[in-house]
Amino acid sequence: MKIEIIAIGQLRKGPMFDALCEYEKRMTWPLKFIIHESKQRDERVKQREEHEKLLSSLSQSAYVIAMDEKGKSLPSSTFSNKIKDLQNQGQSHIQFVIGGADGLSNDIRKRADLLLSFGAQTWPHMLARVMLLEQIYRCQQILAGHPYHRE
């Protein structure tokens, strides 16, 4: 299972960066981060440029999961079952998309095969990156039969 996390903005050194690195080391599935940034000062131009970069990174053959506040909130076991179902259907490439501070464009939401949410609360987009990688790692462990996940 090839996993790509496409996101806006570099994560700077610090506790969130360290946590991300820790989960990245634990992954056995191939994992790649695709990070986009815009140097534009005008916020509207910056946001449009970031959305265009996100859209251009999406593969036609990948199953796209967009992290979005309007998405479904799934328990970890249900998320794992979804990934297992995708594997069983022959899907070998999943792309997760995390927007910037202003979220995702409607074009990205429409392209996504699944809109996924971390619940009703608002989370910083940099923290969402760590939370997502932990859930992908948890899924990997659940599907491997490892006792990491407890219910």
Image (cartoon, rainbow, N blue to C red):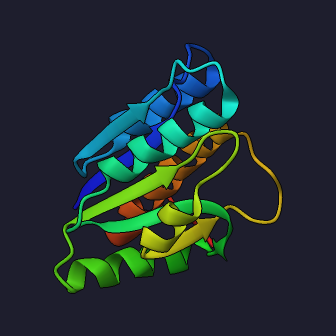
Q: Along the horizontal axis of the image, is 113 left or right of 98?
A: left
Any part of residue 10 in sight: yes
How many numbered discs, if any?
0
Residue at image coords 30%, 53%: 3
Residue at image coords 34%, 33%: 25
Residue at image coords 50%, 46%: 51
84 relative to 53, above or below: below
Given residues 60 and 12, the one toward you in this image is 60
Given residues 101 and 91, the one toward you in this image is 101
- Displayed quadrant of residue 136: bottom left
91 relative to 9, above or below: below
Residue 7 percent location from the top left of the image:
47, 41
Q: Outermost residue, right direction?
A: 121
Residue at image coords 72%, 39%: 124
- Displayed quadrant of residue 104: bottom right
Residue 40 percent location from the top left of the image:
56, 21
Q: Quadrant of the C terminus?
A: bottom right
Residue 65 percent location from the top left of the image:
45, 65
23 relative to 68, above or below: above
Given residues 70 and 119, the one toward you in this image is 70
Q: Quadrant of the N terminus?
A: bottom left
Q: Along the horizontal axis of the image, is 10 left or right of 117?
A: left
Given residues 64 and 104, the one toward you in this image is 104
Q: Along the horizontal axis of the image, is 25 left or right of 69?
A: left
Any part of residue 149 in sight: no
Q: Outermost residue, top direction?
A: 13
Residue 27 percent location from the top left of the image:
32, 45
